[in-house]
Amino acid sequence: MNEVPVMISTKDLAYLSDMFEWQSVLTKVINHYKEEVQDEEIKSLFNNVAAMLKDNCQKIVDILGGMNNE
């Protein structure tokens, strides 16, 4: 299913909230360790992962934001 339904259940909302929290916590962890490592290749990988996690958070926000536009 590629479309977000017009209305989501309470269970779906709770799961989206959990997913957002997981992504947010992982972003903080990645950013912390990015400052701890010396290897530039690893820092670059951490930057890529942090960008992916930020994108995932934005997708969740977009899904929830779209609920008001229907």
Image (cartoon, rainbow, N blue to C red):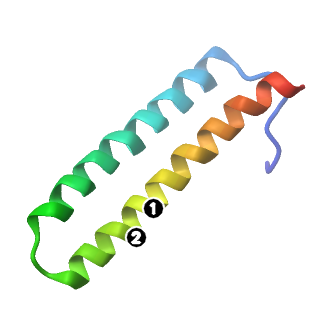
Answer above or below: position of 58 versus 51: above
> Across the whole image, how many numbered discs are drawn on residues?
2
Q: Between residue 16 and residue 59, name the one nearer to us.
A: 59
- Residue 56's x, y, as percent? 54, 51
| Residue 67 in the image, given as x and y percentages of width and height | 78, 26
Secondary structure category for the residue under label 1: helix
Identified by mark 1, the residue type is Ala
Q: What is the secondary structure assignment of the residue under circle 2?
A: helix
* View extreme (top): residue: 10
Mark 1 in CB contact with mark 2 (< 8 angstroms): yes
Q: Is residue 36 left or right of residue 9?
A: left
Q: Residue tagged by mark 2?
A: 48
- The residue that appears at 24% across and 74% down in the rendered structure is 43
**Where residue 51 is drawn, which disc sits there?**
1
Say which mark, if any, is on residue 40: none
Given the image, on which type of amino acid does mark 2 rest?
Asn
